[in-house]
Image (tube, rainbow, N blue to C red):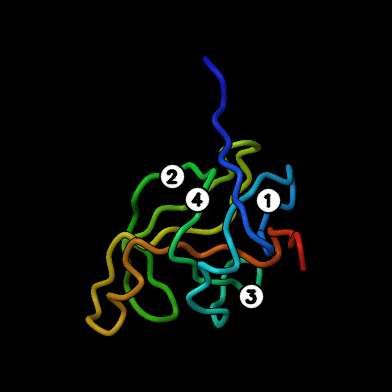
Amino acid sequence: MGRLFIETLSGARIFKCKFCKVDSASYNDIVSKDFQGRFGRAYLFRNAVNLSLGPTEERMLATGLHKVNDIYCSSCQQILGWKYEKAYDESQKYKEGMFILEKERMLKEGW
């Protein structure tokens, strides 16, 4: 099976998986704090690490139809949010390639 590669982020403020404490994203990569996820408040990030992607599916979200992949912690496999693959509405195209991380499933380090 091999070894699991875990990327460690540098910086003062890091978001980590709540379940296994592996780095997930940097505060500097937050695009917006005004999102809603499955478990409550969520943040939109331009970059995230130590994730594995679920299958691509079309999903009707609050802002319309999107093609998304659920994202899982690559260490413990807990669901952390989703990645936007495609937005059908022109006003939502800025989300493509970005990540939603659920606040409820993250720990903050260095705050």
**What residue does disc 4 label?**
71
Q: Amino acid at mark 2?
A: Gly
**What residue does disc 2 label?**
54
Q: Amino acid at mark 3?
A: Arg
Residue for point 56% across, 40% down: 7
Residue 29 image point, x, y percent: 51, 67
Q: What is the number of the mark on residue 17?
A: 1
Regarding mark 4 in the picture, which secondary structure is present there?
strand
Horizontal arrangement in the rendering, residue 93 relative to residue 111 (left or right): left
Lower position in the chain sequence, tag 4 or tag 3 = 3
Regarding mark 2 in the picture, which secondary structure is present there?
strand
**Rendered view: 16 above or below 51:** below
Horizontal arrangement in the rendering, residue 86 relative to residue 106 (left or right): left
Residue for point 71% across, 64% down: 104
**What residue does disc 3 label?**
41
CA gap, disc 1 and disc 4: 12 Å
Residue for point 58% across, 36% down: 6
Mark 2 touching mark 3, by CB under 8 A?
A: no
CA gap, disc 4 and disc 3: 16 Å
**Rendered view: 86 above or below 64:** above
CA gap, disc 2 and disc 4: 6 Å
Q: Residues within 10 Å of mark 4 (few under 14, many from 20)?
A: many
